[in-house]
Image (spheres, grey):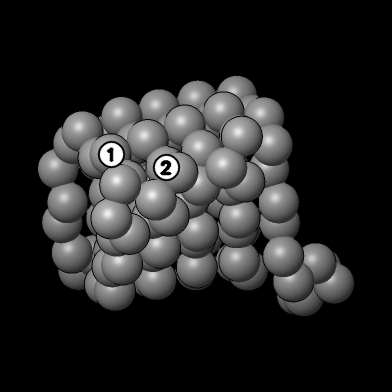
Amino acid sequence: PHDGIRDFCLSRGLGDVYKRQDVLLESNSVFDGNLIADKVTLGGLVKGEVAANTLNVSSSARVEGNLKTNSLSIDLGAEVAGNISRIS
């Protein structure tokens, strides 16, 4: 069932997030945990695994963990320390 939330925005988080909709981590955000969603835009610091059908990594993002996606965009200036793989 649809929970009425189209966008899920995080500025600080600890733990795991599982969403069917879009997730936005703002440029000043800090997230420590695993993140699974249909579409994810990363802008801040992420420590953990991110899995998304569509994944956008903004120039302000720093990722310390693995990325799993079917569609990936990484802006110039973004930092990714981890493996990138396709969702099967």
**Residue 19 or 63: which is nearer the viewer?**
63
Say left or right for 23 vs 47.
right
CB contact under 8 Å: marks 1 and 2: yes
From where the camera sits, is residue 16 visible?
A: no
Give residue 2's position: percent from left, percent from top. 77, 75
The span from disc 1 to disc 2 (Cα, nearest Å) is: 6 Å
Q: Is residue 65 above or below residue 40?
A: above
Say whether residue 45 is left or right of residue 55: right
Query: What secondary structure is marked by label 1?
Result: strand
Spot occupied by residue 32 in the image (x, y as percentages of width and height): 50, 25
Mark 1: which amino acid? Glu
When the figure is inspected, residue 76 is found, relative to residue 50, above or below; the finding is: below
Provide the secondary structure element on which disc 2 rests.
Answer: loop
Q: Which residue is mark 1?
A: 79
Q: Residue at x 60, y 24 (%)?
A: 14
Residue bearing mark 2: 61
Q: Residue at x 28, y 33 (%)?
A: 65
Give percent across and percent down for residue 87.
Answer: 24, 65
Q: Residues within 10 Å of mark 2 (few under 14, many from 20)?
A: many
